[in-house]
Amino acid sequence: QVQLVESGGGLVQPGGSLRLSCAASGFAFRTYAMSWYRQAPGKERELVARITSTNGSTNYADSVKGRFTISRDNAKNMVYLQMNSLKPEDTAVYYCNAGFRNLVRIYVYWGQGTQVTVSS
């Protein structure tokens, strides 16, 4: 059974930091690209950060570049999102995502989300 379980969300003041974690199980984690998405109220879900399965290269949404860092630990089946210098506009539900593509099929899994609220 595939599971992606996020943790680490909460309420933080502007300028603060949070570290989100995603525990993965039930699939070949090291072969999947891992991503964090977020969805704010009334807005579409957007990609925040992604890390590949091959060489660990990363890419980020322009709005979080220089503030957020995605990383993975293949030995522990974990992916992380370190969020620094948080802004009120970072407030959203953050979702962990796993993706894999072969010649015949695309596999995509989602976590249940964790709420991040940035407010004074």
Image (cartoon, rainbow, N blue to C red):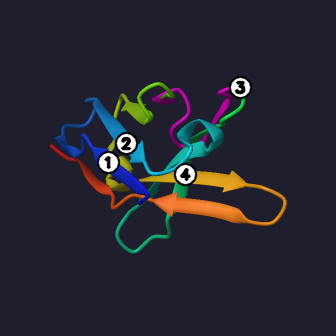
Q: Is residue 61 visible?
A: no
Residue 84 point in image, percent of width and height:
36, 28
Task: Say whether disc 3 or disc 4 marks the residue closer to the N-terminus.
Answer: 3
Q: Residue at x 54, y 41 (%)?
A: 29
SS for tag 4?
strand
Callout 2 amino acid: Cys
Q: Is residue 65 left or right of residue 14?
A: right
| 64 part of magenta stretch | yes
Q: Tell me the distance, in whole angstroms, between the alpha carbons under discs 2 and 1.
A: 4 Å
Task: Say whether disc 1 or disc 4 marks the residue closer to the N-terminus.
Answer: 1
Instruction: Magenta stretch: give its range.
Output: 55-72
Q: Tell me the distance, in whole angstroms, between the alpha carbons under discs 4 and 2.
A: 10 Å
Callout 4 amino acid: Ala
> Disc 1 designates what residue?
6
Check whether the beta carbons of the residues at disc 4 and disc 2 lie within 8 A of each other: no
> Disc 4 designates what residue?
98
Label 1 CA crowd tier, 10 Å (few <14, some 14–19, many 20+): many
Residue 103 point in image, percent of width and height:
84, 59
Check whether the beta carbons of the residues at disc 2 and disc 1 lie within 8 A of each other: yes
Check whether the beta carbons of the residues at disc 3 and disc 4 lie within 8 A of each other: no
Q: Residue at x 41, y 33 (%)?
A: 80
Task: Say whether disc 2 or disc 1 marks the residue closer to the N-terminus.
Answer: 1
> Disc 3 designates what residue?
55
